[in-house]
């Protein structure tokens, strides 16, 4: 990876991955792109930034050509709850953007990464220790685009030799950029609300287990997977990755270790609850560990301590 282009660079993953990659590979070797250009973001002001709507394949090709990139990190996509509300937009953006990115990677021989998700699984998938290779019949539009993306990863690798790499991300928890319209977002919101109001009303019900991961681990694993020797990678569609399997009451208990009076209540959103219930409780990450050494650093308690510290640094009011 010598010259990297990133789409969706202002999103939840992109805003942290872009800064880390600039640090590692050099400011002039990372081309951040997004559909908007806010002037108060380090992604825009502290390095190369270009406007790009990923459904515009011509502009995408121009940027790849102009900057002579050798690696494509494609992050621009709609998340699960928004995609349920806007299925046509979700298909056009998630699949249209991905096809342009894969085509340009084929044409220019680029190394390629795009995330899949636990959303690529469905109600018929085994819920616990979900295997790397298993039933993938999602019941959401988001999941349909993610399974299609995984199939395309395999197809472009086998048919054209594009060096495709991917992971099935669980819910990602971060303190920099809020996720936009995901089912796992409660596990991010809860920390902000804990510090602001010492209480949180969860839209996901008690006892609903989903896989999660802290963003520093997510950023590190993308870099680790992209740097891994290609001949070690058997799975070209996407690897199962996770750092913890948790339900809302687990986060409640972890927060109470810092804010003893914190209270969690529930007002379940039926749309997101149904999505959550269609996803696994806990996926098996053996293939990722064996094939490229995946090893997350943060468990729930370590993540909680760091989230609260980082958010307090940002000036959120605390009750301690
Ligand atoms: N965090 C995502 C979502 O909830 C899952 O990939 O949509």
Image (cartoon, rainbow, N blue to C red):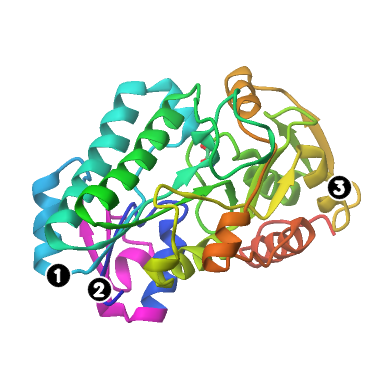
Residue 28 within the magenta-colored segment of the rendering: yes
Q: Residue sitting at 59 percent across and 40 percent down?
A: 185
Residue 154 visible in this rendered orientation of the protein: yes
Q: In the displayed structure, does residue 133 sit left or right of residue 116?
A: right
Distance in Å between CA atoms under marks 2 and 1: 8 Å
User: SS class of the residue under badge 2?
Assistant: loop
Mark 1, ligand 1, within 8 Å: the answer is no
Query: Disc 3 or disc 1, which is closer to the eye?
Result: 1
Q: Compare marks 2 and 1 and give the one earlier in the sequence.
A: 2
Q: Quadrant of the C terminus?
A: bottom right
**Number of the label disc, if any, that sits on residue 300:** none
Please state which of residues 205 and 261 is positioned toward the viewer in this rendering: 205
Residue 271 among magenta residues: no
Q: Which residue is mark 2?
A: 3
189, above or below 270, in the image:
below
Query: SS for tag 1?
Result: helix
Q: Quadrant of residue 126?
A: top right
Spot occupied by residue 266 in the image (x, y as percentages of width and height): 76, 27
Mark 3 Cα shell of 10 Å, populated few (<14), some (14-19), many (≥20)? some
Q: Look at 40% across and 72% down and name the residue there.
A: 229
Q: Is mark 3 within 8 Å of ligand 1?
A: no
Query: In the image, what residue occupies the spot 76% across and 38% down?
Result: 248
Marks 3 and 1 in Cβ contact (< 8 Å): no
Q: What's drawn in magenta, residue-wise? A: 24-52
Tell me, yes or no, if residue 36 can be seen here: no
Task: Give x and y (percent) for residue 97.
Answer: 25, 42
The residue that mark 1 highlights is 67
- Which residue occupies 64% across, 64% down? 296
């Amino acid at each position: 990876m010598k010259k990297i282009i990133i789409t969706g660079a202002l999103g939840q993953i992109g805003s942290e991955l872009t800064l880390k990659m600039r640090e590692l590979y050099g400011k002039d070797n990372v081309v951040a792109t997004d559909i908007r250009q806010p002037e108060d973001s380090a992604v825009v002001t502290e390095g190369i930034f270009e406007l790009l709507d990923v459904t515009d394949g011509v502009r995408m090709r121009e940027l790849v050509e102009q900057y002579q990139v050798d690696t494509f990190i494609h992050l621009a996509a709609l998340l699960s709850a928004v995609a349920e509300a806007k299925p046509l937009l979700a298909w056009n953006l998630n699949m249209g953007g991905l096809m342009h990115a894969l085509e340009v990677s084929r044409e220019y021989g680029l190394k390629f990464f795009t995330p899949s998700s636990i959303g690529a699984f469905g109600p018929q998938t085994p819920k616990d220790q979900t295997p790397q290779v298993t039933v993938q019949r999602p019941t959401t539009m988001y999941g349909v685009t993610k399974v299609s993306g995984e199939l395309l990863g395999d197809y472009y690798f086998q048919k054209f030799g594009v060096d495709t790499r991917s992971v099935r991300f669980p819910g990602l928890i971060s303190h920099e950029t809020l996720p936009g319209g995901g089912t796992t977002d409660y596990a991010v919101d809860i920390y902000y609300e804990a510090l602001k109001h010492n209480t949180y009303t969860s839209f996901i019900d008690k006892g609903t287990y989903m896989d999660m991961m802290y963003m520093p681990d997510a950023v590190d694993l993308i870099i680790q997977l992209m740097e891994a020797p290609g001949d070690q990678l058997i799975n070209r569609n996407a690897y199962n990755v996770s750092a913890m399997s948790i339900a809302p009451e687990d986060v409640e208990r972890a927060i109470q270790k810092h804010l003893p009076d914190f209270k969690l209540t529930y007002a379940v959103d039926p749309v997101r609850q149904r999505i959550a219930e269609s996803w696994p409780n806990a996926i098996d990450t053996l293939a990722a560990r064996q094939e490229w050494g995946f090893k997350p650093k943060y468990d729930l308690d370590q993540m909680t301590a760091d989230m609260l510290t980082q958010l307090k640094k940002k000036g959120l009011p605390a009750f301690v």
